[in-house]
Amino acid sequence: MAKDVYIHREIEDSIEKAVKQFPAVALTGPRQSGKSTLLKKVFGKTHQVVSFDDPLTRQKAISDPKLFLENLREPIIFDEIQYVPEILSYLKILIDRDRNKRGRFILTGSQQFNLIKNLGDSLAGRIGLLTLLPFSREEKKHMLRLKNKTITLQQVFIDACLRGSFPELNMHPKIGFEIWYGSYLQTYLERDVRSIYDIGSLREFQKFIQVLAVRCGQFLNLSNISNELGISVNTVKKWLSILAASQLVYLLSPYYRNLSKRIAKNPKVYFTDCGLVCFLAGIRDKRYLLNGPMAGPLFENFVIQETLKAYANKAKMPNMFYLRTHNELEIDLIIEKNMQIFPFEIKLSKSPNVNMAKPIERFKKTFSKLNILPGRIICLSDKEDFLTRDISTQPLDGYLKWIKS
């Protein structure tokens, strides 16, 4: 693939709208999700780009933030702003001098926890916050078309697992999957974990990530993980918060609004990139991917990660949950929208059957007082078929368009 090919990102419209509405805009997301490339492509001709990855630039900004800013011309893109939090208070002063001027500063950062905290302390009410995750299904379909590859849902799922969704790995097919993810993980550990958090052993932390990977789509039992790794439950909680802040994992909360205490309270864990899960779990083969013990959880992870991207690309907060009762009623995904409850089951199948609808039927019967809408089965099917009177299959494309609407 040509080096100058650029895959347009679905979030571009949301960023352009935010730049017209706020004096400052921050684009966060996992390392290598394409933040810098996107901003340079969209705003490169109108904004000066300042990268704090450059140690010399970073030192100048830290040693004299006021002088540093005076020598720049607006509007400005500040790349990797988390390395120089000192200038945020000075940006606040500049913004407050003219609150009506929009799009003056665009900030990027990979270390979500510290970045959001600093932005919240310094620029509250003055900044729009957006998140860029790796390639979405639609972006990946476009990239696969450029490579003349098939673009069925199954093929996109396989590619998302065995190649991943990070732009660099997809745009450069000669880069090895294992080499890239190994380097990515090492960079993340060294630059985003060790430099900020006091976690002790990086080796233990990496093993912790691997333990989570083989549990993707499962309910988190903190005590079980604590015993397996020989670390305290509090350490498990701390390390989970680091991974969630880095946006490598997503913790899906249980739905218990207006429900009884019979509902399980532990979150379920998902990764924002199936490729990282497969790298950590040692899955390299298509046949094992589709038929091995992690096949179902990985497809569930795929649907959840695409749902998160659909929300993020429209600058929306995800309003999604799962349900599990103590008498073993489980619903894979619940979306709350317009004060209504939409239940979904996620199945790696091209031949959905009526048995897949039973948990949703039971959910609607058990909680009949709730405003529960007809359920859907998200699977590999590319058309909508009714399995019962009001429960049907849901093609993923249609589901994601509904999320964005």
Image: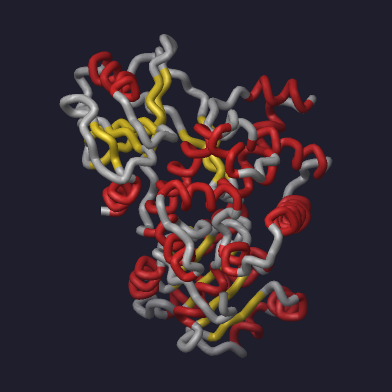
Residue 294: x and y in percent read: 58, 32
Viewer-nearest residue: 233 or 135? 135
Tell me: residue 188, above or below residue 300: below
Residue 213: x and y in percent read: 64, 37
Q: Residue at x 52, y 78 (%)?
A: 5
How many numbered marks appear? 0
Q: Please give left or right for residue 22 compared with residue 179 in the image.
A: left
Q: Residue at x 64, y 44 (%)?
A: 285
Viewer-nearest residue: 119 or 213? 213
Tell me: residue 297, above or below residue 57: above
Q: Is residue 173 visible?
A: yes
Residue 28: x and y in percent read: 53, 60
Residue 168: x and y in percent read: 61, 66
Q: Residue at x 52, y 81 (%)?
A: 76
Q: Residue at x 67, y 74 (%)?
A: 52
Q: Farthest residue toward the top?
A: 327
Q: Is residue 258 visible?
A: no
Viewer-nearest residue: 35 or 99? 35
Tell me: residue 177, above or below residue 79: above
- Image quadrant assignment for residue 176: bottom right
Tell me: residue 370, above or below residue 351: above
Q: Please give left or right for residue 222 compared with residue 319 in the image.
A: right
- Image quadrant assignment for residue 85: bottom right
